[in-house]
Amino acid sequence: MPARANKLTQPLRALLFAGLLQSGFHSISSAQNVTLYTPYTKISVPPGQSIDYSIDVINNGKTVKNADIAVTGLPKDWTYELKSGGWSVNQIAVLPGEKKNLSLQVQVPLKINKGAYRFQVLARGLTQLPLSVIVSEQGTFKTEFSTGQANMEGAANSTFTYTATLRNRTADNQVYALRANTPQGWNVVFKANYKQVSSVSVEANRTQDITIEVDPPDQLKAGNYKIPVVAASESTSAGLELEAGITGSYALELTTPQGLLSTDITAGDSKRVELVVRNTGSAALKNIDMQFAAPSKWDVTFDPKKVEQLGPGESAKVFATIKADRKAIAGDYVTNLEAKTPEVSSRASFRISVETSMLWGWVGILIILVALGSVYRLFRKYGRR
């Protein structure tokens, strides 16, 4: 009897083994029929960055698959959110031959060491998707204030415009007060989103572009000047040092030795006027060109026509010869004289009184006498009749 039982058990064992083996193969095959896919399996980000993954759950099998989705191995202080169709999910069903999309958002903390970090997205019992994140720099928990161009050069009567970036690398929203530590006479204006501001609000791990306009005193001497700028909140602050290279101020004055800007002239004649070109700025001026705007058919010539160079506080003598139109009638006329450089110009408006020539007076008297003589002769000739 035992021998018979043994003979019956062997085929039964073989049958059971074959069934278990077939079941095992079916389980492995079933697991391999589900795939998790994303194109970005290894990326590099800075600290505090939010990473958005788009993950497809693909069912290559012939039956509906219910996949329990989980994220494992995530480093400490990292957080994530898993959604599909706008809903937070932890299980998803996929029809045969189709796929469903998952949105995975991973938040990298601000306080983190530079290096490589790995974790997995699982479809439990079916498959897994390994992911890797390279944190590109050492993490901080502070405010940063920076600019791509901290040094500018120009005249003292110019406005220096700097573009800066304020970065809130803390975990909280911050309201930063903006101020500049400059000597008296300097004017500093902060602008955000094209509006003048004295403070800005910056969300956690966000940035705000700030325009800084610096207007130094017009008579400032040439040199390099530091402009310390600070953005400070209740819990954190950051400083930025700007620099303005002042080449001096440009200012020019055109006048006469006595300051008198009027004269008289006879129609058709010329008048020589002495002018003074004075550099009232703190920077040298070069190639000062003399120009004019006069009434029609008037002319002005300068001697010299151009002043080659004029240092700060220096002056030069220039003569202007003004020629009036010979047919100009008596009255007051305005002639504008101008000294001009690429940086600055100065204009002097001359009021010129025109007098008629004495010659025309004598001609008028002669015409009157001739007329009277003609009348007298006519009276003598025809009066007797």
Image (cartoon, rainbow, N blue to C red):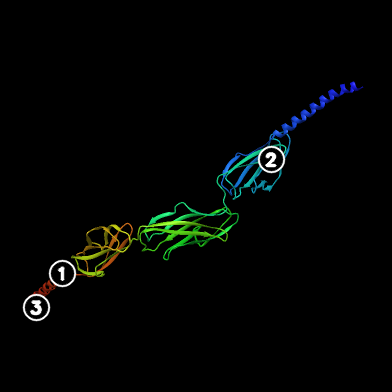
> Can you see residue 55?
yes
Answer with mark 1 or mark 3, whichever residue precedes in sequence. Answer: 1
Q: Position of residue 236 (x, y in %)?
A: 56, 58
Which one is closest to the eye, mark 1 or mark 3? 1
Question: Which mark, by number, is residue 383?
Answer: 3
> Which residue carries the number 1 mark?
360
Evaluate if marks 3 and 2 touch, with contact meaning CB atoms under 8 Å apart: no
> Can you see residue 353?
no
The image quadrant where one finds the N terminus is top right
Q: Position of residue 336 (x, y in %)?
A: 28, 64
At label 2, the amino acid type is: Leu
Which one is closest to the eye, mark 3 or mark 2? 2
Report the residue at 71% width, 34% height from top: 31
Q: Is residue 317 above or below residue 119?
A: below
Evaluate if marks 2 and 1 touch, with contact meaning CB atoms under 8 Å apart: no
State the residue in front, 1 or 249: 1
Question: Which mark, by number, is residue 122?
Answer: 2
Q: Is residue 31 above or below residue 188?
A: above
Tell me the SS state at disc 3. helix
